[in-house]
Amino acid sequence: DTGVSQDPRHKITKRGQNVTFRCDPISEHNRLYWYRQTLGQGPEFLTYFQNEAQLEKSRLLSDRFSAERPKGSFSTLEIQRTEQGDSAMYLCASSPDRPNEKLFFGSGTQLSVL
Amino acid sequence: AQSVTQLDSQVPVFEEAPVELRCNYSSSVSVYLFWYVQYPNQGLQLLLKYLSGSTLVESINGFEAEFNKSQTSFHLRKPSVHISDTAEYFCAVSERETGGFKTIFGAGTRLFVKA
């Protein structure tokens, strides 16, 4: 078990470009979450999946953000037409499908939009 | 809808002093409560959790948290802090949403332990 892995670790892009991040959860975990964290703030919920089903997407998330988990394993988060305000650490977490289970976090992808 | 409020953004304290990090939540249903810790340059990891039963829960490194349903609080305490406790601490709440469980985090409290 290698834990939750995220790729890339860092991404620098120009405003207006599209970016895609990948998350590989712990293999037996049904639930997968995406969070965004900026300096001095807690992780902000973006969306989560149970297996391949996307159960909820934050109302604060614009239509430029989309996430998929096509086979119920890895997930991708795409941001279209990036803006400087999108600069943040994007965190992925996974857990088994039980309410009392902790989240296992990846190391995150640090996005910088210039 | 759930929300988590951490009342202190920063808490400076001297080594061996006691500390309390405050957390209040709002939710209309039963919740599960967590404290996560993020040490400098590391990822988030679980510190302790409350599921049911005894309202006082403890971690292996001396922290404890008490669930108070009437005050909707889950404050984190340690009677004597160490330099190595310097980190950011996040309170989190998990409740059932349609089809599954969603975890929401507070804004975090930065604990800075001084020698």
Image (cartoon, coloured by chain):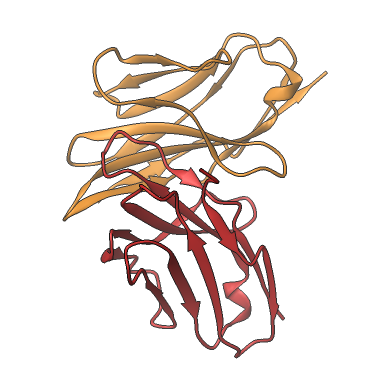
Chain colours: A red, B orange
Q: Position of residue B19 (x, y in %)?
A: 60, 18
Using the image, determine if residue B16 lies above or below residue A2. Answer: above
Using the image, determine if residue A106 lies above or below residue A78. Answer: above
Q: Quadrant of residue B91?
A: top left
Q: Position of residue A57 (x, y in %)?
A: 32, 67
Could you tell me if residue B106 is visible in this image?
Answer: no
| Furthest residue toward right | B115
Q: Is residue A113 left or right of residue A96?
A: right
Name which residue lies at 76% across and 21% down: B83
Q: Is residue B111 left or right of residue B67?
A: right
Front one among A7 and A18: A7
Q: Quadrant of the C terminus of chain B?
A: top right
Name which residue lies at 55% across and 51% down: A106
Q: Quadrant of residue B37?
A: top right
Could you tell me if residue A33 is visible in this image?
Answer: yes
Q: Position of residue A104 (x, y in %)?
A: 47, 43
